[in-house]
Image (spheres, grey):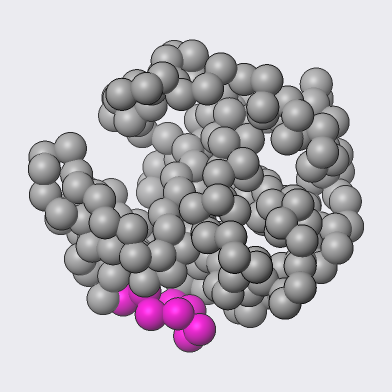
Amino acid sequence: MITAPHEGASRLTAGALRLTEARSENPASIDVGSYLTGLYEHCPFLRPSTVRRMTGWTVYEITPGSHRYAVEAELFYAGVQAAEWVRPLMGRPSGALACENVVILRHCGDLDHRELLAWPHWALKNLYGPVGVMFGKFTQGAVETSRAGRSIPPPPFSFLPVRAAVRPLDPVLLKTTPDLAAALAVADDDGRDVFERIPCEWKAVREWASSLPMPLRP
C-alpha cells in the first residue's frame, strides 16, 4: 500500500502494489549493474549520477488479483513520491544528476506493463513537467533505438525513471507534445503545490490527464 508523501496526495489505495525493496542505490531484488553499464554510452549523465549515488531504485510487485485501476493509482502515487524526493535535490550542487526509478514486477491479469504504465506516466509528466521534473517510461524487453540510431539495451524490468529535467535537451524528446515541451523549456520549481488546482484522487487525476492534448502522430 502506498501513501504519497504530499499532504494533498495522501490517499490510501487498495494495496495493489507491495513494496519489495525500499529505495536503494544497489538493489538486491533486481540486477541493475549490467543494465546501467550498457546505458552509459547513451546517457552522459548516468555514470556521474551513479558514481555520486544519486540514482535510486524502489521496487514494487503487483499483488495477485489486483484490479488495473488500483495498480494505476498506486503507480501514480509512487511516481509522486519519487518526484517529491527529486524536487528538493534539484537546487543543490549536482542536483541535475538526481534520478529516482519506480520498478514494477509481476503482472496484472493479461495486461502488459506498457498498458499499466501508460496513464500514470502521462499524468505524472504533465503534472511535474512545469516544475522541471522529467518522467520516462521503460517496459521490460522493449527494443528501442537512440536518436543517433544505435540500439539501446532492452530493460530487464519495467520502470518509471524520474529525474531533473535537462532544459536544452529534454524539450526535443517531447516534440510530439509541444505544449509540454514549451512548459518544460521554461520550467522553474518555485515550490508550488502541483495539486493546487487538481484533485489528488486518481479518478480525478485520470480524468484531468485524459482532457490534455494527446501526443501528435510522428
Q: Nearer the viewer, residue 65 or 45?
A: 65
Residue that sits furthest to the left in the current view: 149
39 left or right of 192?
Answer: left
Eyeballing the image, is 138 above or below 147? below
Q: Nearer the viewer, residue 39 or 131?
A: 39
Residue that sits furthest to the front in the current view: 110
Q: In terms of image quadrants, where is residue 106?
A: bottom right
**Prevailing SS of the magenta stretch:** loop
202 left or right of 61?
Answer: right
Q: Is residue 175 visible?
A: yes
Q: In percent of the image, x 65 and y 66: which residue is there? A: 108
Q: Quadrant of the C terminus?
A: top left
Magenta stretch holds residue 31: yes
Residue 7 in percent (x, y) is at 86, 43
Residue 66 in percent (x, y) is at 76, 67
Q: In percent of the image, x 69 and y 52: which residue is there? A: 72
Residue 200 in percent (x, y) is at 82, 37
Residue 156 in percent (x, y) is at 36, 71
Q: In percent of the image, x 50 and y 48: which residue is there? A: 162
Q: In terms of image quadrants, where is residue 52?
A: bottom left
Q: Quadrant of the N terminus?
A: bottom right
71 left or right of 41?
Answer: right
Looking at the rendering, the stretch of residues picked out in magenta corresponds to: 26-33
42 left or right of 3?
Answer: left
Q: Nearer the viewer, residue 136 or 186?
A: 136
Q: Is residue 184 visible?
A: no
